[in-house]
Image: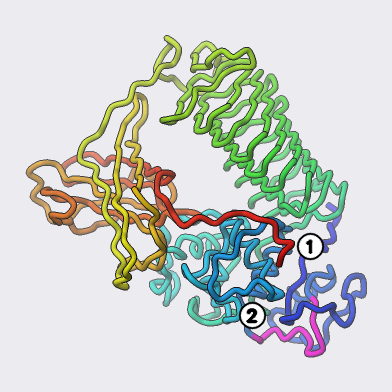
Amino acid sequence: MRKIPAALLSLALTASLTAPLASAAGTGSTLPELDGHWSQSAFERWHAYGIVEGDSRGMRPDANMTVGEFAAILSRAMGYTETVENPYADLKGTEWYAPYILQLTVAGILQGDGTNCNAEEPMNRERATVLFARALGIRPTAQPDLSGFVDGKDAADWSAGYIDAMAKDGIIQGVGNQTLALGSSITRGSVVKILDSSVAEYAVEEGATIDQDVDGILLVAADDITVDGAAVSGNLLVAPKAGEANLTVKNARLERDLRVSTHGATLTMADSQVEGDVALSGDRASLTLGSGAQLARLAVDGAGSSVSVESGASVETLTARAAVKVDNQGAINKAEVQADNVVLDGKRPAHVEVADDVAPPQNSEGEEVTGSEDSQEPGQGGGGSGGGGGSVSEEAVAGIVGVHPVDQDGGEEDMPSVTAKATKKTGENFVRIALSTDGVVPIHQSEGAGKGAWVGVAIEAPEGYEQGTFQYHFGTEASAEATQSAAITEDSSIGQGKYAVFFLNASSTAPKTHITVKWEGQEAVQYVVDLSGVQTPAVKPVSYTHL
């Protein structure tokens, strides 16, 4: 495979972001000032690409990096352009780093502390690891285990899953002696090293072909890229920097996710398998699945998108969270419709599930589309609820209560009440819990956790339950096992019974929404929490040209 040059981002080493004294691209310089430094090879790689640029003081690998400089790296790496109305009290909007801070905010990567973004403060290792993981689409592990690090217990609840995932992928190794030093400031050398370790391949040359295996993340940042006959062990990301990109994937195996965040992208897949998720978050995406394309999960979040499933292609689960037009000539086992104006043409999926208060999907003739077992190709998918149009019944589940949030800092802001609605559909092995609030949940401090828009849910113990504890799982991914133990809560403000109580951060980009509870002597029950009804402080996208 030819090495693809990467002119993708600049490492901001000065607050003014002035032009460097000399461009490193194409010079082949070896940066003698870094001779013998542990980050030398990483600096030389990215400096040779024209990505890491120094100033009159040099590369300064041991100097600390600020939050603003770090934001510039990620924003330029991904090519973000959308921004938001400034929500931060300590950001004037005229600073050189302001566009980058706001671009990462609207992308859901950087959140600040609820009031400030602290852009001029040193970035610490914990926060840097989490922001890298979010930008690169690395999902947090559901049950993080940092016991291999002597200070792993110091990881916050919001960071532990990301840190564990980054460590398991070999992207971070700590600072030596099995130590993470999460609260320490991160140096420029460490940032470049993480960048070097995380992204295995840059596709930044228009028309390039990746035809050998990629051991790590493949980041697409140019038009007309082809992946042919390769296995990619990390995520394949189509970044906004790629513009209205064309991506072709054939005879390939993607072991993780394929994530498309640019608008107007055109993707074609054939004779390829995606073992993780395919996520179309950019608007106006067009995906064509040719013969031999096999997707486990396809999620469409971008409005105005289209999906064509040709004969011989299959999708196990299609989730439409935005209006999308689907032409299915292959096999779709299940369609989860969570938005209005979804069009399903061609063969009907075996199962169609429509969320509450959402209009059922229709075909182009205006006919309502329900699931049909007859739509399955031989050998595709498992059994379901039978024929008869694929109707699904739903029953209410008692004993689930919303819990009023409490600000542990004792703030004066009024906290809204929380309502929980729990239901279970036929054929499903989990209970859905929809949380809603009668007002905006302000960013506040939760006991034992950080700041966020915290809301609670309480699951009542069986009548006559005598034990003082219960077993549970609580994470970003589902688990049938409940391996952790916690004490029963008895609080008259919740109800008269005994409860298992969980608090969820509705302002998080990756909140824990999967709960499994096992009461002594009973089978474990899985729950999935829907936070879409929880009102959080709004951040309105706007143009950034005024900055």
Q: Is residue 26 left or right of residue 97?
A: right
Residue 227, horizontal then vertical, whole percent = 77, 43
Secondary structure state at the residue bearing disc 1: loop
What residue sits 43% from the left and 51% below the top?
A: 476
Q: Is residue 462 left or right of residue 272?
A: left
The crowd level at tag 1 (other Cα within 10 Å; few <14, some 14-19, many 20+) is: many
- Residue 297's image quarter? top right
Front residue of 268/380: it is 268
Secondary structure state at the residue bearing disc 2: loop
Report the magenta stretch's main SS.
loop
What residue sits 40% from the left and 61% below the top?
A: 442
- Residue 322's image quarter? top right
Question: What range is drawn magenta here?
Answer: 53-63
Marker disc for residue 8: 1
The crowd level at tag 2 (other Cα within 10 Å; few <14, some 14-19, many 20+) is: many
Q: Is residue 61 magenta?
A: yes
Front residue of 296/418: it is 418
State the residue position of label 2.
Answer: 65
